[in-house]
Image (cartoon, rainbow, N blue to C red):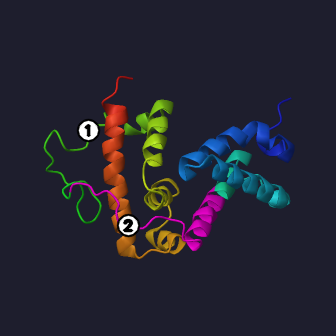
Amino acid sequence: MTVPSQERGPETWVDLHGDYLFRYALLRLRDEAAAEEVVQETLLAGLQSYARFGGQSSERTWLVSILKHKITDHFRRRSKLAVFDSLDGLPSEPDDVFMHDGDWIDHFDAQRGPLDWGDNPALTLEQTEFRQALARCLSSLPERMAAAFTLRELEELSSEEICKVLQVSPTNLWVLLHRARAQLRLCIETRWFRQPH
């Protein structure tokens, strides 16, 4: 008889979920040591609260929800230590990439605009090679810019929450996200869409 994963218990977490949790954290934190640390914190927090785990979701889903909080805590600690780079000196992007609200400007010429992601962009996002290209592109961004993008687009925090975590004004957050999106678009198009698959 196969035991459902939510009934396997903490002794199996590293074998069943460790690699997944590490990859999840590494994509977001861009630092192996930091990813290992938040995964360890996640497993410890899961162990401490396992008695309250109700089984409404799978263990992996539950552990990922804990990991998301640990990642946010990591960014919050880094912000308090003031180890992020500032906006000064960041490379800029062409002014005509985004509108003020963050949407793409729709009058791009064919050489400048976002490339067509095909009929099913969600399918592209599921491809391992694309995720690797995204991770490489994220790792090329300055740390605070990558943190803002990660918290907004991957962790889906609100702008207000991100401003508190990163200790930035809403205007600075908008600039960080604007620049991150533009640089990621250019990087992904170069590393993914213009490469043979």
Residue 176 in the image, given as x and y percentages of width and height:
38, 63
User: What amino acid is labelled 1 in the image?
Assistant: Leu
Using the image as rendered, state which of residue 147 and residue 56 is in the foreground.
Answer: 147
Would residue 103 appear left or right of 139 to someone viewing this image? Answer: left
* Vertical arrangement, residue 96 with respect to residue 60, above or below: below
Q: Secondary structure at mark 2?
A: loop
Relative to residue 117, is residue 161 drawn left or right?
right
Specify the segment rendered in magenta: 68-94
Query: Label 1 near label 2: C-beta < 8 Å?
Result: no
Question: Alpha carbon of mark 2 to alpha carbon of mark 1: how far?
Answer: 28 Å
Q: Nearer the viewer, residue 59 or 39?
A: 39
The residue shown at (62%, 68%) is 77
Residue drawn at 55 percent across, 49 percent down:
30
**Quadrant for the N terminus in the image:** top right
Circle 2 residue: 87
Crowd tier of the residue under label 2, counting other residues whose Cα lies within 10 Å: few below 14, some 14–19, many 20 or above: some
* Residue 80 location, quadrant: bottom right
Q: Can you see residue 120?
A: no
What residue lies at 22% left-to-right and 61% top-to-bottom? Answer: 99
Report x, y in % for residue 136: 46, 41
Query: Residue tagged by mark 1?
Result: 115
Residue 6, magenta (yes or no): no
Disc 2 versus disc 1: nearer the observer:
2
How packed mark 1 is, by other alpha carbons closer than 10 Å (few <14, some 14-19, many 20 or more), is: some
Picture layout, residue 16 above or below residue 51? above
